[in-house]
């Protein structure tokens, strides 16, 4: 009896160990796999943190395997797909802006990219300019010295010596920003006619601006040539100018007595702008529009103006003028917004002047600040800047252009279909354009006509999502892997407890490399990356947690309640000194002070953007880590390390160097 029980127990234990198993096989139905560290090294897509600090080349980080950085040593076209709040900015665009030594055009929702990176961009030798039409940044901080409040796209310095072909390219770029092309045959009829009229009016404004610039340049040249001291004539009149006379005063000195304003002439303010163009056709009749065009054509003899006149004449015959003007007014509807209208007025001398040529050949970064509640107003504005840059590259001397230009376009999917994105990608590396695009779902990408071109970007990053189209796409590109299923079955003869029959079979089957459940349940700190067809699953890298970006980023005022450790803007180069590793308690005190500032703790006193703490409250924090008889010495050490300043402008308060 006892022997039988023992034998039966051994049989059951044996069969318990012989459960069905899954084994990797020879790839008959697919050989997909996640890329390992060996493959990443072969692709030069993994780098040790130590080498990234010593190597001369940069590493544009997109992830981490827990020890090493995953990323490329050169900027690559990149798409990131993730819903709001999944860290597209904190693990993507901000990291790039803190590292990329190229001029950047940034679509910045809420202004968080500008706030966290502009100080580092200055340290890198860049000139960041915020195009903040509705003054979004004013709610957080005074950034007026970096803000462009007015901009005139009808006047950029590279237009001065532009050829007819170059002007044609520029005019088409401007028109395309307002009136997008269409494949609908009925709509295309109105689009083509409206583009013709708008092109004519824009060409008049640009020609007027170029002519005025040349006149002012010549006038100033003649004024500077007048020798006031040696002149013996009592009266001089400037040739071909109506600005005034030069006469001798009672003291024998010569001066301009009429229209002195020429020397102080505000050339930018006097230029024709988009608002002037809109006013021209907003309420005018066909006859008035035709009269404006014909008068201008008598000066410039322009084919664009000829085409616009012909379109209006034909529209009058076909009773189509109303449809053309309706299309024009609809296309320029954003200019009816008072804030946008004010922005597109001609800038004054006291304004920050934004010239697209400064982006193309200089060191200027352009941040277009988009408020979350007004994104619908911004597709045309963003397209305008993209188009001007795209064409501007062809208008400047090729020897002056930079090798690369980076477009970082945050939440671009929310702006709808932008043909400019596809046009930039078709130009590609030849012009030096690189795009980092941020979408919330694959469905937003599918709205593009050339969506397959976008899906073929070198790097595509996927964050956790439940959006069906994104799940299907990621599941599909993951592919299949072949596994071998081993099945074992046990049969027992009821007449004998000891008799059992074991049968086994195996077969090869295909399973998904990236199952649907994996995508839906992907941890928040993980991502799936497709790099040139290779599938990588790895950790995200957050700029405010990683040593690589320490002391490089600024305060993100739009997330003031978050626990990002960062430094204020009024101290771009003067960062907090690092604490020796053995002084862990001092570092804890520093972190405590930083967290209290971020969370608005009552112990912290904020004065003019700086932070202070009184002696009693500072002692309270120190006593968490040190004995009472050590407090004075610790305060001295905190002062020596630059964490606090004992001497401050306010009595009984210690300044926190945060």
Image (cartoon, grey):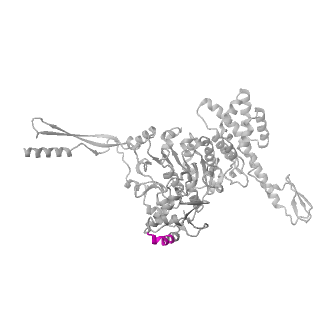
Q: How many marks?
A: 0
Residue placed farthest to the top in the image?
318
Q: Is residue 367 magenta?
A: no
Residue placed farthest to the left in the image?
1
Q: Residue at x 64, y 31 (%)?
A: 189
Magenta portion: prevailing SS class: helix
Q: Nearer the viewer, residue 264 or 601?
A: 601
Question: For the C terminus, which image quadrant?
Answer: bottom right
Residue 215 placed where, x, y %?
A: 79, 52
Q: Is residue 111 left or right of residue 35?
A: right
The range drawn in magenta is: 627-636
Q: Is residue 360 above or below residue 575?
A: above
Q: Residue at x 38, y 44 (%)?
A: 518
Q: Is residue 535 left or right of residue 10?
A: right
Residue 409 placed where, x, y %?
A: 55, 47
Q: Is residue 240 above or below residue 414?
A: below
Residue 600 placed where, x, y %?
A: 54, 56
Q: Nearer the viewer, residue 456 or 365?
A: 365
Q: Is residue 634 magenta?
A: yes
Q: Is residue 405 visible?
A: no
Figure quadrant of residue 264: bottom right
Figure quadrant of residue 228: bottom right
Q: Nearer the viewer, residue 513 or 237?
A: 513
Q: Is residue 645 visible?
A: yes
Q: Nearer the viewer, residue 320 or 432?
A: 320
Residue 311 placed where, x, y %?
A: 71, 33
């Amino acid at each position: 009896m006892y022997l039988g029980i023992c034998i039966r127990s051994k049989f059951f234990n044996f069969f318990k160990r012989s459960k069905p198993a899954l084994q990797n096989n020879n790839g008959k139905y697919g050989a997909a796999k996640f890329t390992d560290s060996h493959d990443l090294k072969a692709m030069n897509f993994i780098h040790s943190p130590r080498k990234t600090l010593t190597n001369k080349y940069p590493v544009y980080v997109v992830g981490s395997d827990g020890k090493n950085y995953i990323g490329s040593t050169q900027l690559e076209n990149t798409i990131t797909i993730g819903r709001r709040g999944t860290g597209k900015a904190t693990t993507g665009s901000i990291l790039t802006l803190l590292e990329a030594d190229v001029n950047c055009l940034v679509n910045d929702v809420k202004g968080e990219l500008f706030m966290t990176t502009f100080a580092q961009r200055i340290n890198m030798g860049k000139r960041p300019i915020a195009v903040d039409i509705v003054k979004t940044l004013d709610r957080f901080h005074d950034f007026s010295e970096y803000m462009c409040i007015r901009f005139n796209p009808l006047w950029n310095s590279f237009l001065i010596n532009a050829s007819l072909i170059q002007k044609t390219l520029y005019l088409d770029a401007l028109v395309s920003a307002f009136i997008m092309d269409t494949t609908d045959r009925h709509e295309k009829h109105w689009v083509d006619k409206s583009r013709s009229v708008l092109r004519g009016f824009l060409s008049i404004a640009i020609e007027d601006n170029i002519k005025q610039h040349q006149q002012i340049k010549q006038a100033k040249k003649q004024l500077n040539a007048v020798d006031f001291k040696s002149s013996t004539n009592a009266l001089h009149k400037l040739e071909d100018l109506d600005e005034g006379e030069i006469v001798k005063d009672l003291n024998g000195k010569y001066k301009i007595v009429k229209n002195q304003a020429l020397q102080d002439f505000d050339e930018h303010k006097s230029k024709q702008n988009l608002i002037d163009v809109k006013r021209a056709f907003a309420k005018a009749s066909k006859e008035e529009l035709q009269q404006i065009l014909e008068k201008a054509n008598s000066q410039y003899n322009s084919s664009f103006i000829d085409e616009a006149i012909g379109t209006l004449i034909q529209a009058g015959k076909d009773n189509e003028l109303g449809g053309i003007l309706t299309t024009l007014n609809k296309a320029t509807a954003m200019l009816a917004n008072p804030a946008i209208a004010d922005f597109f007025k001609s800038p004054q001398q006291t304004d920050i002047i934004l010239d697209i040529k400064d982006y193309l050949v200089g060191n200027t970064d352009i941040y277009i600040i988009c408020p979350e509640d007004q994104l619908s107003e911004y597709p045309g504005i963003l397209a305008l800047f993209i188009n001007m840059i795209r064409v501007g590259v062809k208008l400047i001397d090729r020897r002056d252009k930079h090798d690369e230009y980076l477009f970082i376009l945050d939440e671009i999917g929310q702006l709808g279909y932008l043909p400019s994105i596809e046009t930039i990608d078709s130009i590609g590396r030849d012009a030096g354009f690189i795009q980092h695009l941020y979408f919330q779902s694959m469905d937003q990408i599918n709205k593009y006509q050339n969506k397959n071109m976008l899906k073929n970007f070198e790097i595509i990053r996927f964050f956790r999502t439940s959006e069906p189209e994104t799940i299907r796409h990621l599941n599909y590109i993951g592919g299949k892997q072949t596994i071998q299923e081993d099945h074992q079955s046990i049969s027992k003869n009821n007449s004998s407890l000891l008799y059992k029959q074991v049968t086994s079979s195996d077969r090869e089957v295909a399973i998904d490399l990236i199952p649907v459940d994996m995508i839906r349940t992907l941890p928040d700190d993980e991502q799936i990356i497709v790099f040139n067809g290779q599938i990588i699953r790895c950790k995200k890298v957050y700029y405010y947690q990683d040593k690589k970006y320490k002391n490089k980023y600024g305060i993100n005022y739009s997330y003031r309640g978050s626990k990002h450790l960062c430094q204020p803007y009024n101290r771009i180069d003067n960062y907090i000194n690092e604490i020796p590793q053995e002084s862990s308690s001092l570092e804890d005190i520093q972190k405590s002070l930083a967290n209290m500032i971020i969370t608005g703790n009552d112990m912290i006193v904020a004065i003019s953007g700086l932070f202070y703490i009184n002696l009693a409250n500072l002692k309270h924090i120190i006593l968490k880590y040190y004995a009472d008889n050590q407090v004075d010495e610790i305060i001295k050490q905190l002062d020596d390390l630059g964490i606090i300043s004992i001497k401050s402008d306010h009595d009984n308060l210690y300044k926190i160097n945060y």
